[in-house]
Image (cartoon, coloured by chain):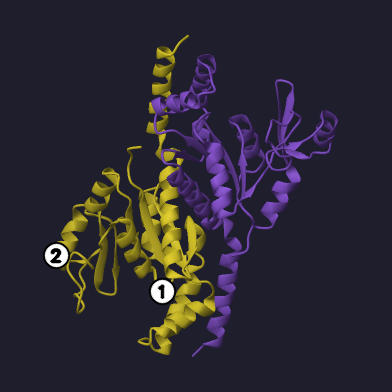
Chain colours: A purple, B yellow
Amino acid sequence: MNKKGVLIVISGFSGVGKGTVVRKLVEKHGYSLSVSATTRQPRPGEVDGRDYHFKTVAEFENLIDYNGFIEWAQYVENYYGTPRKFVEDELQAGHNVILEIEVQGAMNIKQQYEDAVLIFITAPDARTLKERLEGRGTEDRKVISKRLKRAYEETDDMPSYDYLVVNDDLDTCVEHVHAIILAENFKTSKNQAYISRMKEELSQIRKETAL
Amino acid sequence: MNKKGVLIVISGFSGVGKGTVVRKLVEKHGYSLSVSATTRQPRPGEVDGRDYHFKTVAEFENLIDYNGFIEWAQYVENYYGTPRKFVEDELQAGHNVILEIEVQGAMNIKQQYEDAVLIFITAPDARTLKERLEGRGTEDRKVISKRLKRAYEETDDMPSYDYLVVNDDLDTCVEHVHAIILAENFKTSKNQAYISRMKEELSQIRKETAL
């Protein structure tokens, strides 16, 4: 069944471990990962092209002008965007592409790619989410409080996602997201060409075997 | 995430191996299997309650009168039907229920259960399908020709199914159908109660941790 790939958009609460889920999906199941472009400075250990495509403001704004992003946004003083060419080339080649992005970006993408599959990664319950935010150790109470507020607000956006997956055990969560991507590829709407071909072949074979 | 189970309706071309796929799904993944009722005579080796619920015509017609079937049909001189109580009890208990049924029955069920998930099992191509029909050895050319005609007609119904799964390798096919059932359980529409609970919990936790 030759066909276009599926665009998978993954969001989730801060602290829920969605970055790790995405990395494991790519490592284990070979999905294509869309790497964002940004104008912010690389942090220690970040690699250009792997973590982000690092751009100057002039480069980024030029790409905006040339429709180079399927979505972009400005947070504080930095730009962030999803390069269009990579995503479209991969989908065209029949590869499933994963995109990790926050809620507003996900909604923008759904408007342009109605076949995009939106998955929200969540925690078993709110207490677990809070514990994970605290467990990071690096965040002070003010940051945690702010993230819980953000999580509370994001529950309003959860109904806009196609699927909710709980990240309780990491490997289980990865397999559940993988199952969703597999299933999406079996949707009848993605396999119209197969149906036409089967109909034609059966017609041909019936002629050959006519009694 | 406590919720109702998913009703899975499986159809497929004659000879495609859907019966084996269904049996493996039940054995390996513990899905509930709906057993049909029929008025036809048991064949050698068939067990009442496992292969079919064997009924007299009077019993069957009485069950029709009492709305005991979610769908029923008459082929030649025999009745076949899907008992309502088993399916509804299992769904209510949160179990995913599998139903193997031909195309017309599947359409009837979709009309009553709009959340039912319709899966069509197909062969890699028409030639493989023909080989499998011939490979059974028990069928004469006339029967094979009739089944190929039926398959040709059924391609018109394939677009009414939610998913198409190719049965090339049996174990792979079973895992693909299993992935679809998993994915269906993660649909946001099936998890509204979880979203409400999460929102409430986050609201509570924010009060407790207010700075």
- The residue tagged 2 is B58
Location of residue B108 by image quarter = bottom left
Q: Tell me which chain the residue with mark 1 is part of.
A: B
Q: Position of residue B31 (x, y in %)?
A: 31, 55
- Please say whether residue A45 is visible from this viewpoint: yes
Q: Which residue corresponds to the image point at 26% horizontal and 44% vertical from the top-left?
A: B93
Q: Quadrant of the N terminus of chain B?
A: top left
Which numbered disc flags the more N-terminal residue, 1 or 2? 1
Is A147 located above or below residue B78 in the figure?
A: above
Residue B181 placement, left or right of A205: left
Tell me the element at label 2: helix
Say what amino acid the circle numbered 2 marks. Ala
**Residue A42 location (% of width, % of height):** 72, 31
Residue A52 numbered mark, or none: none
Q: Residues within 10 Å of mark 1 (few under 14, many from 20)?
A: many
A195 left or right of B169 in image: right
The image quarter containing residue A107 is top right
Which residue carries the number 1 mark?
B14
Left or right: B98 in relation to A113: left
Task: Tell me residue A128's x, y (percent).
Answer: 41, 28
**Image coordinates for residue A99, horizontal then vertical, percent:** 62, 42
Q: CA distance from mark 1 to mark 2?
A: 30 Å
Residue in the image at 44% along x and 54% along y = B179
Q: Mark 1 belongs to which amino acid?
A: Ser
Rate crowding at label 2 as few (under 14), some (14 to 19) or many (20 or more) other CA atoms within 10 Å.
Answer: few
Please check whether the numbered discs 1 and 2 fall on a single chain. Answer: yes
